[in-house]
Image (cartoon, coloured by chain):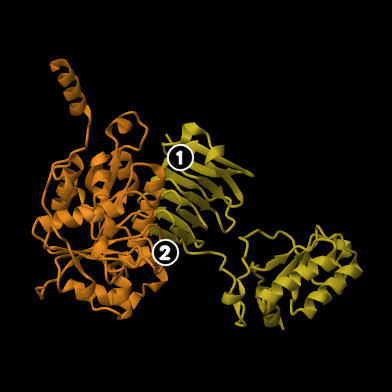
Chain colours: A yellow, B orange
Amino acid sequence: MSSLICQRQSLTFRARSYMAFVFTPQPPIADWLADLDATLERSKGFFAGHPVALDLSAAGLTPPEITQLTASLAERGIRVLGIEGIAPHDATPGLPPLLRGGRGAQEIEIPEPAAASAEPAPALPPQKQEPASLLIDSPVRSGQSVVYIEGDVTVLGSVGSGAEIIAGGSIHIYGTLRGLAMAGASGNPRARIFCHRFEGELLAIGPHYKTADEIEASLRRGPAQAWLDGNTLKITAMN
Amino acid sequence: MSEGKSARVLVVTSGKGGVGKTTSTAALGAALAHLGQKVVVIDFDVGLRNLDLVLGAERRVVFDLINVINGVAKLPQALIKDKRLENLFLLPASQTRDKDALTEEGVAKVIAELRTKFDWIVCDSPAGIERGATLAMRHADAAIIVTNPEVSSVRDSDRIIGLLDSKTEKAERGESVEKHLLITRYHPWRAARGEMLSIDDVLEILSIPLIGIIPESEEVLRASNVGSPITLNAPLSAPAKAYFDATKRLKGEQIPMQIPSESRGLFNKLFGRKAA
């Protein structure tokens, strides 16, 4: 008996965090469900077997409505792991548990039909990714497009007028940037753009961009960097 | 025709139209032939052929590149021998067809056959980046990128260099097409006033080696109009000299580069006036 008690005392519980898709339904819920259906139509089975959390802070639903929503999602093969954004007294026992303290991760793009097909859903990106970067040791010519969502892009030459670099992470250009650079394309607001000489046509980090016209003329022809200050794209000289 | 040769295939290209591809093809082809090389120039501008006019061979066109590709004519029947230089031949384009008549296999076959008979195959590319231009550069060992010192021409050339690095046979084999920049229609006085891009600007943007700078000159237009390459029609003129120097550099000779300048011309003018 005493040994059993000892064993019980040694039982430990560890917390572990997992990645889950977060749905943020907006009223009217019927329209939101229709949009969801349209997405599912393009990428069948994308959410199947994956944990999904509901953020109901914007939905303003009563407990019966929440029950109905989880049932509607279940009909579509989506199982709700937990709910956040509702008052604790609304979390009735029949509903998935209340979640707190979730940390944001990058947005997940739903693959287009060609990529998705009927195959099982792609695995969620692991929480800790290996540092990924792409090195280009030749000039990027007009009309060429370098897209590297996995991480940073470093260009040793120049990026020509009419060329574009799109990176999930930061962009480093050791020549002249005359074309377009879009960093943080996977939603990373800490991504930056650095260039040895700026003569570019457009700079963007995530959804925030500035065209050459909107960028101070004094920054042209010098080394510059661009970063996000909240929702503002800032560009400064580097010397 | 002597067999057993292995020609270098040179494409003259630019992306933009009107920069001087055809003029340069004729001038370089004639200069190469003048230096003892056996040369064929091919007009890839199917539907808008011009090279025959610039070479003064328009009255002697019977068969063309498309006829050869379609098997209507044999290659030797379509080749037109220049009247002035016995080493220079023209394979004209068809004026009645369009670029869709060019097939990848057909062009490959024609180039392969010409390679055994000539020292140089100079392909005059049409403007643009479509079928005619991509097939003209497809088999190139070397490329001359004709650029005017102005922004639109430079950007189009940048685009073409990207295609030379990706769409050619050499690029697909992991090799690199030798690239040379030929700056044409250079006005020394406009450059001095900052009205055009400087040579340094163009070289900085395109970052490929310079093979020559051809000054803007009425001689070039005059030569085109009489159907004679500038290097034959006015061999002592400034543009012809620049083309000859470029041709020698293409053959591997070390010739110092001269940036055309009008300072001497201006001096002569002043001097001449004083003397008069």
Q: Which residue is mark 2?
A: B130
Query: Is B41 located above or below residue A182 in the figure?
Result: below
Q: Which residue is mark 1?
A: A224
* Residue A66 in picture, x, y percent from top left: 86, 69
At label 2, counting other C-alpha atoms closer than 10 Å, the crowd grade (few under 14, some 14-19, many 20 or more) is few
At label 1, counting other C-alpha atoms closer than 10 Å, the crowd grade (few under 14, some 14-19, many 20 or more) is many
Residue at point 14%, 17% (across, down):
B276
SS state under label 1: strand
Q: Nearer the viewer, residue A31 or A133?
A: A31
Residue at point 55%, 43% (across, down):
A211
* Residue A202 in picture, x, y percent from top left: 52, 46
Left or right: B204 as drawn, with respect to A68: left
Q: Nearer the viewer, residue A26 or A66?
A: A26
Chain letter for the residue marked with disc 1 in the picture: A
- Evaluate if marks 1 and 2 touch, with contact meaning CB atoms under 8 Å apart: no
**Amino acid type, mark 2:** Glu
Asked if marks 1 and 2 fall on the same chain, the answer is no
Tell me the quarter of the picture where residue A111 sits. Answer: bottom right
